[in-house]
Image (spheres, grey):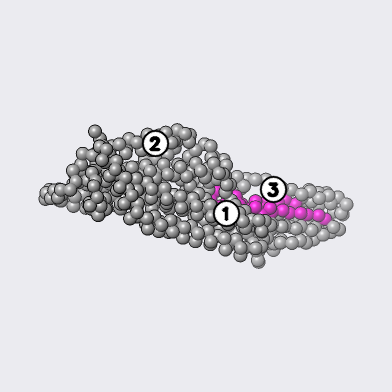
Amino acid sequence: MFMVKEEYANIKNLLRVRLSTQARSFFWLFIVVAVFMVGSGATAIFGVLENIDGFKNFSVADFSVSFFGGVLIGFTIVMFLYRQTNAKLSVFPQTNNSRFISSVIVNYVIAIIGTFAVLVMYLVNLGIINLLTAFRDNIHLALNIDIGFIIAGFFVYLAYIFLIIAVLELVGTILRKWTYYAAIAFIALFSLAVINILRVIEYAPKVLAFLISEPSLPLFFLKAFGLWLVITVAALVINRFTVYGKSPTKASKGVVIACVVIAAVISVVAPAVVLFNRASGGSVSVSEIEAITDPVNTAEFDAIRIDVSHLPRGSRIIISGENLVIPDDNGAISSWNWNTDAVVHGTESLAEIQGDTLIVQFRPPAYIVNGIEILHYTNPQVTAHLDGNTLYIDYTRDSASVVFMPIWGMVRQFDTFKDKGVLSAHSFGFSSGWWGSTNINISVE
């Protein structure tokens, strides 16, 4: 039998001990996540409160992404501390299975607590921002809030973390079963990956596409569960037939030399090969970044048409208005604030009008942050009317505080959540781009 009745009791007892001894660690994990997320949220919240009349955007970091990286590092460390941790529990009845299973369950509990902490802190920040919107109507969330995405994202995120834990546990069991030979194999694979890092970056997503590019949510969970089950069973089987409690076999000189040579390849030869390929124009290639055309750049101007047929030909029209900047005869602008001002072009056509219709064309700038056009929250408008020989133009823009508050930035593969405005353009990092200025073009026909 794979497990005997006594092992179930051992698992239960070891699990209780592990949870009780690590209760403080769970508490501090929650506190650390809370501090970072509340700190990031507080920065945005205080910025919103200070931005009464202006236009600004604020970002709250998506800590689900950084926590995911922390999971990879943290559980890798836990994997290497497996023997040391179990040594402290040696006074309790145990077997290979009970030790391993109780350890794995604790890792899953830690992952759930950490993920839950990320979700709770996100909801806290979200609640505070929504509370502020009740008192200030110029506060806007750049991303839509979708309860289905928040809930589904939580479980998809956990599925990815569980898979990482399962893979690390499998690696750990292999290292404990065939210590030196496994170490040599893993170091060799790692060195090959370093040498061919660009190819790894290119082909890894294709190899994992069956999972990370699966557009159907139900199929993703089926695939993730099936993959997790296979990896976990493999780790359990290997662990079941691994002998512990004996002094580790001393490494032969050949094994030590092999490890040293492979380490040298990683630290010296691999970087040299990469640099040589880059210098000689070898097979190392850099994937091109696809240019994204901003649709606003090709947008047509909105036009206001004013009848001036009652004015004699050659009449002069004077411009008056709010928040306008008129370049001098050389096209220079002495003072201009893109956040509040509009630049007027074509004023020379008003010196001596030679037509019956005055056309005032208006196009606002584009300010795209994380793939989202945020200037539309300011509702930019231009009004124009003629009174005698004076053309009155007013350019107005509302104040706005636009807050980016992403969650589950990695969960973007599913069709059901596309085009819902729940995700920013990037899982990692931040991007922004500003095109042009607010332009008002004047002409006479």
The residue beneath circle 1 is 127
- Residue at x 61% of width, y 54% of height: 130
- Residue at x 32% of width, y 39% of height: 232
- In this rendering, which labeled residue sits more in front, label 3 or label 2? 2
- For marks 1 and 3, the one nearer the N-term is 1
Query: Label 3 neighbourhood size at 10 Å, few (<14), some (14-19), many (20+)?
Result: some
Look at the numbered discs 1 and 3 and tell me whether their residues touch, using CB distance below 8 Å.
no
Q: Is residue 145 left or right of residue 63?
A: right
Look at the numbered discs 3 and 2 and tell me whether their residues touch, using CB distance below 8 Å.
no
Q: What is the x, y in percent for residue 94?
A: 24, 46
| CA gap, disc 1 and disc 3 | 39 Å
- Residue at x 69% of width, y 57% of height: 397
The residue beneath circle 2 is 225
Q: Is residue 88 left or right of residue 340?
A: left
Q: What is the x, y in percent for residue 163?
A: 37, 42
The residue beneath circle 3 is 301
Secondary structure beneath label 3:
loop
